[in-house]
Image (spheres, coloured by chain):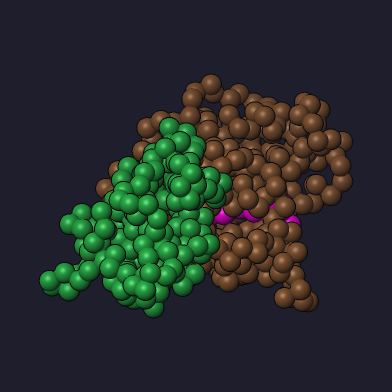
Amino acid sequence: MTRLVEVPAQFDDRSFDQFAGAFAEANKDAERLLFDAHAAEWASPYGLVGLLAAGQAARRGGSAGAADRPLLTAPTNPEVLSYWTRAGFFREAAELFEIHGKVPRAKAAEHSDVLLPVTPVRAAEDVHAVVSKIQQRASAILASELGLDPKATMGFAMALSEACQNIVEHAGTGGWVAVQAYHWRRKLARRVVVIAVADAGVGFRHSLEPTQSKRFGDRWGDAAALEAALVQGVSRFRDPGRGQGLAGIRRYLVRWDGKIAIRSGTARIAIVPKWDEDVPLKDGLPPFPGAQVLIIIPEQGSTEP
Amino acid sequence: MIQYIDMHAVLQQSVSSLYTDLVTRPTGRVVRERIEQAIAGLGGAEGAGGAGGAGGAGGPDGAGEMTIARIDFAGVGCIDYSCADEIVAKLLRDRPAVLVLSGISEGHREAIEPVLTGHGLAALIERADGTLDVLGAKGAAAALLDELVARRCAARRPGGTYALTLA
């Protein structure tokens, strides 16, 4: 028997909990999953890397055999299909899913708003490649279109590096990163650059449990783990220099009025700028494996919602 | 003696000649170990070399050797917080050393300064004109300058700036 997981028509961080709920329900037993994206109208980088993480978590039997892979029906809308292809989604999805539907053979975009197509992150070497590529491609857009000081490009690369290292050091498995610039009509009516990182690894609670759970006592859980990591800057390592990464990302985002949100397990934490209405901490969400990070840097100037 | 470290050369020797960025902890660890070898006089780093006589800088009373390393960041793209901690902070945490950073961009400084401040450590920045600036925790930075002056490794210039007296 195959269980259906519907991919939201507008698939981004806001609809991700709906997707996670459907995934958690369908993934309760060991049945094969079918991710149905045929009606997808739009997906953010967060949606795309999150879908890959779900595909990774839904693999059965621990092998790469076709029968162990979940199914995925590709979007039918040609424009959506074209964007998912340009964003590099299908290149990564081909290894994780048995894909149904026509998928264009076009290569991932080299000159577009896709600053970094969906890229796997498994080791430190991958982080080097990501940072190198983003500096070549992003500096012009960050400076000319977002109005960031050209010096901010290096900070952007640092933030991206630290977000990716979270996978390498804590997830216990590989993950994906994608970076895109787009005009965010819904929220800000201005351009933004979005970094999305997702994995289906052990998540923050499991990673921090050996060193932090006693300190939190009964409060310990996904929300407490996220709070410890993002707000208190703690790490699973006892080395006093650890925990610099997320703290550094926070400093960068405060300076450029940006936002970070991290979802792990059943909780989601966010550092919320004035222009956003998100809540700082949500608990009791549908469970989803690993960690998913969203970083948004808006065009500089007035960011009144 | 001031040990000269060409960070870009050490990086390329440590990871890949394709990359110019100091990112990730594993990279930082390898780079730091090469610098440590160079400081210890083992010649581990291709981009390392000594200047001046042998040994460290002794105190005014002749006691207490101090290692001074001039680390040139020219040619290094980005440095992230993890690498800054793994290289700069750990070099200072684990031994009595003075790090003089040159070729530093504002982006490099943004990553290194909070890491040093968080550990209560300080390093020096050598500007293109040879004057010194401090980086890191205020108290540690003031103490560092005082010690260098006391050891006659640095001197106050007219106008109140400081510069190294050693080559």
Is A187 positioned to the left or the right of A165 in the image? left
Is B70 positioned to the left or the right of A195 in the image? left
Q: Where is residue B133 shown, x and y percent of the image?
A: 27, 66
Give whichever of B143, A264 is nearer the camera: B143
Q: Quadrant of residue B68?
A: bottom left
Q: Main secondary structure of the magenta part?
A: strand
Give whichever of B29, A122 is nearer the camera: B29
Residue A260 seen from this side: no
Chain A takes which shade in the image? Answer: brown
Instruction: Name which residue lies at 75% across and 64% down.
Output: A210
Quarter of the figure that contains the N terminus of chain B: bottom left
Instruction: Name which residue lies at 76% across and 41% down.
Output: A58
Residue A236 seen from this side: yes
Q: Where is residue A175 shown, x and y percent of the image?
A: 62, 43
Q: Quadrant of residue B122?
A: bottom left
Q: Which residues are magenta?
A: A285-295
Give yes or no for residue B54 being in the magenta stretch: no
Give whichever of B49, A239 is nearer the camera: B49
Disc count in the image? 0
Q: Where is residue A298 shown, x and y percent of the image?
A: 38, 57
| Residue farthest along the left direction in this orientation | B158
Instruction: Name which residue lies at 56% across and 46% down.
Output: B26
Is B166 positioned to the left or the right of A39 in the image? left
Quarter of the figure that contains the C terminus of chain B: bottom left
Instruction: Name which residue lies at 27% across and 48% down.
Output: A144
| Residue farthest along the top direction in this orientation | A105
Chain B takes which shade in the image? Answer: green
> Looking at the image, is A32 positioned above or below residue A50?
above
Q: Where is residue B70 shown, x and y percent of the image?
A: 34, 53
